[in-house]
Image: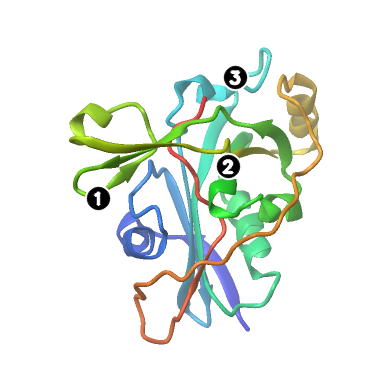
Amino acid sequence: MIREVKQITYQEAKPWILKKHYAKRIPSISYVFGLYIEDKLSGVCSFGYPPNYNYNNGKCIFYTLQILTLELNRLIINDGLPKNTLSQFVANSLKLLPSPSVIVSYADPNNGHHGYIYQATNWIYTGPSTPKHRYTFANGETFDIRRGIDKKGEIVKIEKLLPTYRYLFFNGDKRQIKQMKRELKMNNLPYPKGDNQRYDSGDDLWPTIAQIVHIIYAVEYHK
């Protein structure tokens, strides 16, 4: 099985994110990579600037160090691929990002995720994010970002959510990674454990794809 990870365009990634990821919305995207197997696009991994401005240049991550900070905000692959495909896809996507940099991402226990892909690729677990709420509007849409909900219409339901699990990845050479670890002001904690869920995308792009494994629900605003 021939695999290749390479940068793809926003337009190539858009249908995957909108139709196959259950969040059904486009996050901030600065870099997006595709997993190709036998020349067929079989996965998408996107990175963007964190919506929380406190993360800009690692402001809330490091004491004094200023480092490019990105968020891994969408990760989608076809079902039925070999077990190590996802970790290899993430690892090779990280190698294509600017260096040095620090990557933040979140695993959402509200959707049965604990971040095993981050654990498999040696990310640092820094603890839970600030708890937030999910807002349901009269038109059936849901939103979990407090900012901007006044433009969404009438709120008919508010649910308190479990905090997401926050992970960090240091991208750089040995010296740079050592410096980032020394400057880290967040906790370095044991990995959380639990049973992950699998999801049916419900809307395939190709008839041959029956399911998508949703590994990350990357929320769009964290404190």
Residue 205 at x, y percent in the picture? 34, 75
Q: Which residue is mark 2?
A: 106
The kind of residue tagged 2 is Tyr
Q: Amino acid at mark 3?
A: Cys
Q: Is residue 123 above or below residue 185?
A: below
Q: CA distance from mark 2 to mark 1?
A: 25 Å
Crowding near pointer 3: few (<14 within 10 Å), some, many (20+)? some
**Which kind of residue does numbered mark 1 sit on?**
Gly
Instruction: Give x and y (percent) for residue 141.
Output: 27, 48
Check the image and tell me how it is coloured: rainbow
> For numbered disc 2, what is the local secondary structure?
strand
Q: Nearer the viewer, mark 3 or mark 2?
A: 2
Seen in the picture, residue 17 relative to 1 is either above or below; the reply is above
Q: Residue 86 vs residue 131: left or right?
A: right
Q: Quadrant of the N terminus?
A: bottom right
Which of the two discs, 3 and 1, sits closer to the camera?
A: 1
Which residue: 69% across, 73% down?
A: 83
Q: In the rendered image, which residue does mark 1 sit on? A: 140
